Image (spheres, rainbow, N blue to C red):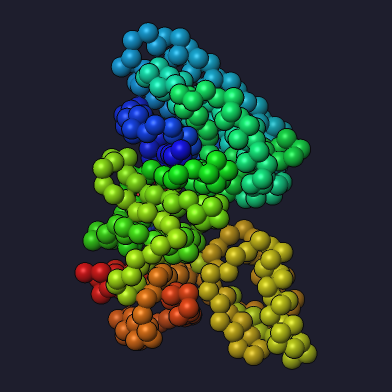
Amino acid sequence: MHILKFGGTSMSNAKTWQQVFDIIKRYESPFVVVSATARTTRSLIKAAHKAIDHPQEAQMIADDIATRHNNIVEHFLADYDDSSQTLMACHNWINICIEELKEHLATIHSQQELTEQLKDVIASIGERLSSYLFTECGYAAGLYTTWLDATQIVRTDSNFGKASPNLDFISGKINSLQQKISADNIPVMGGYYGMDANENITTLGLEGSDYSASLIGAALDAEAIEIWTDVSGIYTCDPRFISDAKPIPQLSFQEATELAYFGAKVLHPSTTKPASKKQIPVWVKNIFEPDEPGTCISTESTTGGPVKAITYKENCTIVTVTSSQTVMGYEFLAGVFDILRWHHLAVDVVTTTEASVSIGIENGANLDDAIEQLNGYGSVDVLNNQGIISLVGCNSDNCLVTDILSQVRNVPQNLISYSKSKGNLNLVVDNDQVLSIVKTIHKKLFS
Ligand code: ADP
Ligand code: MG
């Protein structure tokens, strides 16, 4: 079995839906996971926030989402005879979802509050819409697509916004479901969302559909998990900004995880976890160029150049905490990281001295709260407007570091960390320098 995941760009319009169905037809027993249509999740979250003070704008966003989905199914089904029943079913489903959305928006306005729990319910509407409509349209196009509601399969904890899945539950559920589905059916499930033990809808974090696909792949012991997107694999750098970036044919699970973690948006950082546990290869492929090889992520890695890829994150902060004299070094570090843990903050770059620690970290709502708490723990310096550049898969001696640093010697480096054993070099620089440095280093390493 192959798990095929199609992201927002693949789901954006009637034409891409047709391309996706043509890809699905190539497989003998696929299991399909889809994202929301392009921009929908962001619109839903925007509507949820707007609902507090601007209820009419929020309702307009809801209407716009309805119109876009109606347009997609109408355009798609126009090419198929005898599809009026399907069209009715689709319109009906869109109405149900948008009515539900509008009720939630009204609740937010009347209570003047948007809880994390309700935000997840609203965010999940994107995938609930797309997966059902896509299933209906697939059937009209001659595929035996059958809809699976992710709430019935993807059990998670109750950490709204970034819930952790329960792989054992998912395995039990999906395997018993699979037995009931006839062999020629093609299951289609929305990614990104699931449900906790109290029947609350949860989400796995933004871009979480990749993760859903990997969880299903691991649960079903799939032959391969394929992440289909709008570029031909994982590149040496984001091809949208670095025009001479090239696809990487082969990456190890660890390299791919680090690339995703340090900002390569093409893959959700948790995607590799379930797959690597079961040693299932993950492919990244392009719906617009389906015959291109793409990237294979597995236990193997190719050796070759000095570095596998460069990634970057903008909008980061360096926080430096200096201990008051009374605390021992080890206690001090443990205390700082305890505060970060409490705020669910993942650190990207860290360096320490005996009495201080500097941390490079992505901006976010929790960071301000954490900084306030750290203030009570030692003296805190905050450097805003930072960007983190990461070189992943460094396969070389220390000369590489000297070499790279000499390339950017005119730019102030605000924080540097290098691990030879992990093959990882991180540079933290001013935000407005990030792209030009990335271009310089990429040229040096890959041209
Ligand atoms: P989807 O909608 O299919 O989930 P995403 O937008 O999440 O697609 O991811 C694909 C995008 O990731 C690409 O269009 C590309 O701009 C971006 N990207 C960032 N870094 C990389 C990289 N190293 N390799 C490939 N794509 C990358
Ligand atoms: Mg994505």
Residue 367, by quadrant, is bottom right
Residue 53 visible? The answer is: no
Residue 329 visible? The answer is: yes
In this view, the residue in front, 283 or 13, is: 283
Locate residue 167 relative to residue 299 in the image: left or right: right
Q: Position of residue 38 (x, y in %)?
A: 42, 38
The residue positioned 35% from the left and 54% from the top of the image is 295
In this view, the residue in front, 115 or 422, is: 422
The residue positioned 40% from the left and 82% from the top of the image is 412
The residue positioned 58% from the left and 60% from the top of the image is 364
In this view, the residue in front, 43 or 177, is: 177
The residue positioned 53% from the left and 34% from the top of the image is 190
Number of disc labels: 0
Up the image or down, 321 lies above or below 60; here it is below
Quarter placement of the C terminus: bottom left
Up the image or down, 209 lies above or below 129; here it is below
Q: Position of residue 431 (x, y in %)?
A: 42, 69
Locate residue 51 relative to residue 9 in the image: left or right: right
Up the image or down, 246 lies above or below 91; here it is below
Locate residue 131 relative to residue 294 in the image: left or right: right
Q: Position of residue 312 (x, y in %)?
A: 41, 65
Residue 4, by quadrant, is top left
Q: Position of residue 193 (x, y in %)?
A: 59, 39
